[in-house]
Image: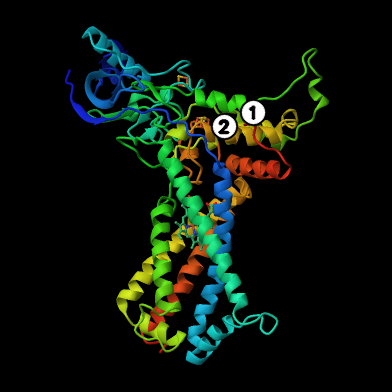
Amino acid sequence: MTMTEDGPRAATAPHEERTMRITLRVWRQENAASPGKMVSYRLDDVSPDMSFLEMLDVLNEQLIMEGQDPVAFDHDCREGICGMCGVMINGRAHGNGMHDGAVQTTTCQLHMRSFKDGDTIDVEPWRATAFPVIKDLAVDRRAFDRIIQAGGYISVPTGTAPEAHATPVPKKDADNAFDAATCIGCGACVAACPNASSMLFTAAKVTHLGLLPQGQPERDDRVVNMVAQQDREGFGGCTNIGECSAACPKGISMETISRLNHDLLGALRAGARPKS
Amino acid sequence: MLVVTVTTQSGQRRAPKAAKTSSVFKKVVMAVSGIILVLYLIAHMIGNLKAFAGAEEFNHYSEWLRTIGNPALPGATALWIIRIVLLVAVAAHIWAAVSLWRQAKRARPQGYVTKKANAQSYASRTMRWGGVIIAAFVIWHLLDLTWGTVNSDDSSPFGRVIASFSNPVSVAFYTIAVVLVGMHLRHGIWSATQTLGQSNRRREVTVNYAATAIATVLTLGFLLTPFAVLFGIIE
Ligand code: HEM
Ligand code: SF4
Ligand code: FES
């Protein structure tokens, strides 16, 4: 008890008394080859301060206690920087549009206070041919790694670090490159895109490296090879719908896609062809 | 705890079918052919407004289309060149559209149980089925006004326009198609700017306003003639 001017008052913060009842409908799928289905679970004791992943942890503890198979989901940093934790929440990538405030972020940064007591929440994996389900909500995003391997790198000489001021970068380019570099490879753009296209991801990488002096030597080969690789992985083609950018936790802009197209057309005119 | 099975769907499987033609190449084909069609539509709309000048002017305009370039070019050569360019543009446009449509289907064979849109416009969502309806309309439109096959009056181009648009059903079908074209261009012009790498954050707003403006002007311009006929302003 603490004393206030009005007299004695309970020390517990009011929100601790509030717990929520949530019904989850979770996609359960044994492996890539088996069929999946939505399964409903009731959670009676969800704190509004839990993150979405903590809520899934609670579900899994409950499932393990009951001798059932816990729900597989990916996660790592739980601070919005690694890009592992993407799931579809109520039909939106990372549950975006439900976060507190206007800031767009990842599933691990979504808190249960964004939902109401009694809500039913659908949780599904990213769905794309190029992102096969490993189990339940976990998908294989190695297609992104292969796109990076196809051209998302620069060649640097080894040895002593060069003088930092030797290569000036215009402020505007540095800012735009940095904005593009914030892409965490989470795959929300693919998940949200009606065409299941990976264009925003690839465009972020092409923009990030293509705007900097260090990215120039491979600039033409990079764009043709990364685009060829994303087609090879079975992603869809971009039709500039804009769902990707609206779903992106890092706010990668549609401008990057235009820049990719611009670079690609220039590279093709200059004679660059994808490695087969 | 209660466990309820809600839906059963087959599992996802990888089907990496190597794309023979780059998806961006298809988009460039779509953008270039689309732009040719937009330029044609602008000319076509201006031509249609000649109906306000009366039967003689309109028929004369129609006659002129068939003799452009005469006597340097014999007969309807110029008109046929235009027709072939348009035909190639339409074929290329539909090829690219269908190809990307199928690629999108392959890229996500199994849809979401729940999916909500955050950003997509109605225009962008109706590009594909809208395009199919537009294609059907174009065929009817040619049978009706160019060849007169499905038209009750086959005396003159002006006569066909009056006969067709005196019928409210015909005007209704025409209106639906033209509004669909307008929406198609609302998204298409923005999309083409992106595809050709000409958009950026600064231009984005302008491009979108321009797309809306061109789409609106074309839609209204095309609707003016049929409604004027329907309400007896042109007769
Ligand atoms: C004949 C039936 C048609 C079909 C099936 C069709 C289909 C499509 C599709 C699927 C797209 C891509 C949509 C997107 O980017 O999201 C598109 C884009 C476009 N269409 Fe069409 N369309 C048709 C007719 C037309 C006509 C008559 C015009 C012009 C007057 C036109 C102009 C455009 C333009 C400018 C684009 C943008 C190109 C781009 O996305 O880069 N289309 N069309
Ligand atoms: S572009 Fe955005 S949504 Fe796509 S992978 Fe990168 S961070 Fe995720
Ligand atoms: S767990 Fe790393 S971004 Fe969410």
Residue A207 location (% of width, % of height): 64, 35
Same subunit: marks 1 and 2: yes
Single out the mark in the foreground, 1 or 2. Answer: 2
Circles 1 and 2 in contact, beta carbons < 8 Å: yes
Q: Is mark 2 within 8 Å of ligand 2?
A: no
| Lateral position of residue A35 relative to residue A242, left or right | left
Q: How is the image coloured?
A: rainbow
- Circle 2: residue type: Gln
Q: Quadrant of the C terminus of chain B?
A: bottom left
Nearer to us in this view, B2 or A80? B2
Please name the residue that numbered disc 1 is placed on: A151
Nearer to us in this view, A200 or A176? A200
Label 1 resides on the chain identified as A
SS at badge 2: helix
| Lateral position of residue B90 relative to residue A137, left or right | right
Nearer to us in this view, A266 or A248? A266
Vertical position of residue B155 compared to residue A47: above or below: below
Please name the residue that numbered disc 2 is placed on: A229
Q: Can you see residue B208?
A: no
Residue B203 location (% of width, % of height): 61, 51
Residue at 23% x, 20% y is A43
Q: CA distance from mark 1 to mark 2?
A: 9 Å
Label 2 resides on the chain identified as A
- Circle 1: residue type: Gly
Residue at 48% x, 66% y is B216
Q: Quadrant of residue B13?
A: top left
| Lateral position of residue A118 relative to residue A259, left or right | left
The label on residue B57 is none
Residue A261 location (% of width, % of height): 62, 43
Q: Quadrant of residue B234?
A: bottom left
Residue at 30% x, 74% y is B169
